[in-house]
Image (spheres, helix red, strand yellow):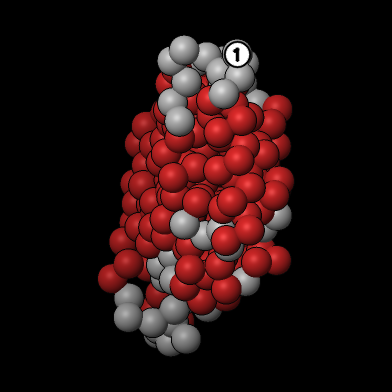
Amino acid sequence: MYARNQNNDASAFAKMLDNCSNFDKDVRHTGALDLCNEICKSADQLEENLEKRICAAFIQHLEDESMEVKSNAVKCIQRISPKIRDTHLTMIVTKLITEIVNGQLEALDIFSLTVRGVVNDCSDIYAPSLIQTLYPHLMRGIEQGTAQVKEECLDICTEVFKRFGLIILRQPNLVNKEQLMNAINSQLTGGATLSLRKRASYAMGQFAVILNNQQLSKLCQLLLRKIGTNQAKTDTII
């Protein structure tokens, strides 16, 4: 697929990749941006091994000491996500969601924004793989993360439900809805901060759309039970 003139382009790509590991942060930034532009302007798909090396370079930049290089990498990833192979997109998303759940605070918001951007731009063909990649990490973040990590994971859940709700409804084995319902509900009714409970309410609103009648009835019972007990906080968002 990316049927380009390899004799003419191989040295150019090699130079760009070499620039990505240069000691100068400005050169690293430019190298990544040049690679991104090459992918975006091409009507074809890159040779698989070259594409993998480029994606690996972007992943490496996610850990760069320069915030400028790191920010550029997440922008490049979002731009190329509709054009790269499923395996390479999964490789990148796994890195991003792992960093989010592990609570890398300095880049938490931009990593989360990038994952949401990938979800929004991702082809439906790649959706099942993307959902299955994100799901276990999101559950861990919601159940065990700091308040800030929980908020970002809930925001990603909201985007996933909104973008791929119909796919999840048709392929119920992609996620454990009961587990998700309980995890989101626990933050909705018992989250440590008002902001966290608001994020949970947005996620639950999108999540309710993909439930069957029995699951929706159970959700309503859970919420009504909380409203009717003293356990519900006065400012709980339900």
Amino acid type, callout 1: Asn
Q: Is 236 placed above or below 158 here?
A: above
Q: Can residue 44 be seen in this view?
A: yes
Residue at the front extreme, as displayed:
228
Rendered residue at 56%/53% (across/down): 216
Which residue corresponds to the image point at 57% horizontal and 73% vertical from the top-left?
A: 170
Image quarter where the C terminus lies is top left
Q: Quadrant of residue 188?
A: top right
Q: Position of residue 228 (x, y in %)?
A: 57, 23
Residue at 37 percent of width and 32 percent of height:
68
Instruction: Give SS at disc 1.
Output: loop
Q: Residue at x 38, y 82 (%)?
A: 44
Q: Which of 88 and 35 is in front in this view?
A: 88
> Could you say where residue 147 lies in the image, as x and y percent from the top left?
56, 20
Is 182 located above or below residue 176 in the figure? above
Q: Is residue 102 above or below residue 167?
A: above
From the image, tell me which residue sits under label 1: 230
Q: Where is residue 7 in the image (x, y as percent from the top left)?
A: 44, 82
Front one among 102 and 50: 102
Task: Specify the quadrant of the image occupied by residue 113.
Answer: top left
Residue 187 in sight? no
- Nearer-the-camera pick, 75 or 38: 75
Looking at the picture, how far across and down is residue 41, in whole percent?
Answer: 28, 71
Could you tell whether 47 is left or right of 28 in the image? right
Observer-nearest of 103 and 127: 127
